[in-house]
Image (cartoon, helix red, strand yellow):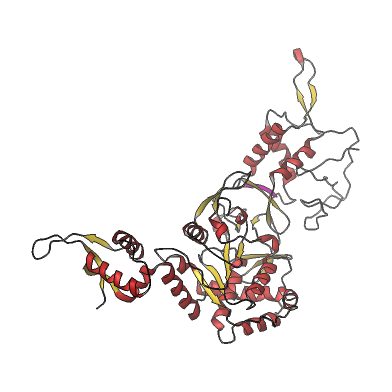
Amino acid sequence: MTTPTHLNGHPRPAPDSTPFDSEGRPDRTTRPPAESTPAPVPPDSAVEELPAPSNPLAVARRLLPDWRNPEGHLTNRRWRGGWMRWNGTSWREVDEEQMRAGMYRRLEHATYSTPGKDGGEPEVREWAPTKQKIANLLDAAGALTLLPADTDAPTWLDREPSELDRSPIVACENGLLRIRDRALLSHTPGFFNLVSVPFAYDPHAQAPAWEAFLADIWPEDPESVAALQEWFGYVLSGRTDQQKILLLTGPPRSGKGTIARVVKELIGKENLAGPTLAGLGSNFGLSTLVGKPLAVISDARLSGDSTAVVERLLTISGEDTIDIDRKYRALWTGKLPTRLMILTNELPHFGDSSGVIAGRFIALSTTISWLGKENTGLTDALTAEMPGILNWALDGLARLEQTGRITEPTASREAVLTMQDTASPTSAFLRERCITGPTHSIPVDNLWAAWRHWAEDNNVRPGTKQLFGRNLLSVVPQLRRARPRSADGQRQATYTGITLDS
C-alpha cells in the first residue's frame, strides 16, 4: 500500500494518529486534529495528482500545507540562501541535499494531467521527479517561504511591530521564557530563534558548586564575576548590540577551559563554533559561524600580519553585514549572530593603528593556576547544575537589561589599555605626551621630533613621517593639517587640534 507523505519526505499521519516531527519522530508538541472519527485510508491504487512540472509555483502552492503546523505557521523557511526548519524549540539550517531528498520521496508516485490529443480525454502522466524538476520546485517553494534578508534572529515573525515585546526571550525545553517577568510561553515557529537551551527552565534551581568555583577563581574580584554573569545572559538572549568580545586570559589550568565548557553546555553543543583566530582571516574562515550564536576560540595565537583577523573581529562584533564564502554552497550575506569568546594564556597582540579593536574587549584575567591539583570531576559536577546556572545567567541578563552595558572590571580596563598601547603605540604616545582640542596646534616637524624621541625610549619603530601622520589621524579623527603663514611670511606645515603637553 502506498503511504501518503509530507513535503519533507516523512509519512503523513492519518488524522487519528500521532503526528511526526521534521525528523520522522512522534511529535508530542502538536495538537491532534479535533475530529474523533478516523478518516478513510486511501486504497493501494490511490495516487496524488498535482499541477504539471512546467508550473513549479503551482506545484509548490499545492504542497505548501505540508510545511505548516496545525496552527498554520510555516515550519520550513528560505533565509539568506539556505533552508531553515523548525525542530519544535528552535530553527535549524537544513542541507539542500535533505530538502531535495524529501522532495524526491514526496513526488515519487505523483501524477499530472495533460490535455488529450485532438480534444480527447486528458492524459495522466507520472510526475517523475528529476534533478531539474526538483531544483525548479525548490526554487518556487523558496519564493513562497522566503524571509526578508534583513530578518535577524531572534524575532517574532507573526506579530505586528506594535505588538512586539522588546523583552528578551530564551527558548528552553519546556517553553519560551520571557525575561521581563520569567513567564513561560508556548513554543511556536512564529518565533524565529536559532538557540534553545537543552534543558527545562526551573525557577527554583540553584548552582552552589558553580558559584563556589567562580569565588575560587576571583576571590577578591566580584566585578569579574558580575561581568561573566552578564556575558552568559547576553549570549542566551541572542543580542549583539553590546558589540563586545569576551577575552579570558590566564595561566594553564586556571579555569578558562572550564568556563568555556560550561557555556557550551548552557547553549547546546550544536550552537557552538570553534574557529581558530588565524582561521578567521582565511577565505572560508567565517563559514562555520553562520547560524552559530557563540564562537569559542581556544588557545588563541597570532603570527605575522593580523590585519585581516582584526578586520573580521571588528566586523563580527560590530554587527556589520558581511559576505561569507561557503564551500560548494551559495554566498551567504547578512549579519552574523555570533558572539566571540577568546581564551589565551597572554594578552594577544593585534596590529591596529587606530586602537579600536582593544575597546571591543571585556578582558577577564584568571590568575590562580591549579596545575597539578586539577579537580577531574568538576565539569561533571557543574554540568549537573545547568538549570541553576541558567537562572544565574538570567539574573545577569536582567541586570544587563537595567544597566544597558556589561560590567567592565577595573582589571579589565587596565588590560584593554595595555592591548590598545600594544596594538597602537601612537595611542600611548598621544595619552602620555599630547593634549587635544580645537584651539591647539603644533608644527608637524615639532610633533614628529617628539614622536621619534618617545619611540626610541619605548623601543618602538618610528616609521616615516607620513606613516606617523596617518596613524595619528586614525587615533584623532578631528586632526587637521594646514600651512598657515608664520611671522616671517613663510608657510609651515602644522597640525591643528593637537599639541604637546608641556
Dominant SS of magenta comes to: loop
Q: Is residue 154 left or right of residue 120?
A: left
Residue 75 magenta-drawn?
yes
Name the side, left or right, on which 144 lies relative to 472.
Answer: right
Residue 306, position in %: x, y?
48, 60
> How far across and how far down the image is residue 343, in percent?
59, 70
For this orientation, the residue located farthest to the bottom is 220
- Quarter of the image for the C terminus: give it: bottom left
Quarter where residue 498 is shown: bottom left
Q: Quadrant of residue 426?
A: bottom left
Magenta span: 71-78
Residue that extends furthest to the top in the rendered view of this protein: 118
Q: Position of residue 63 (x, y in %)?
A: 73, 39
Q: Is residue 185 visible?
A: no
* Up/down of 363 relative to 189, above or below: below
Q: Residue at x 55, y 53 (%)?
A: 282
Q: Residue furthest left?
A: 488
- Residue at x 51% of width, y 53% of height: 321
Q: Closest to the observer: 292 or 161? A: 292
Residue 165 drawn in magenta: no
Counting labels gives 0
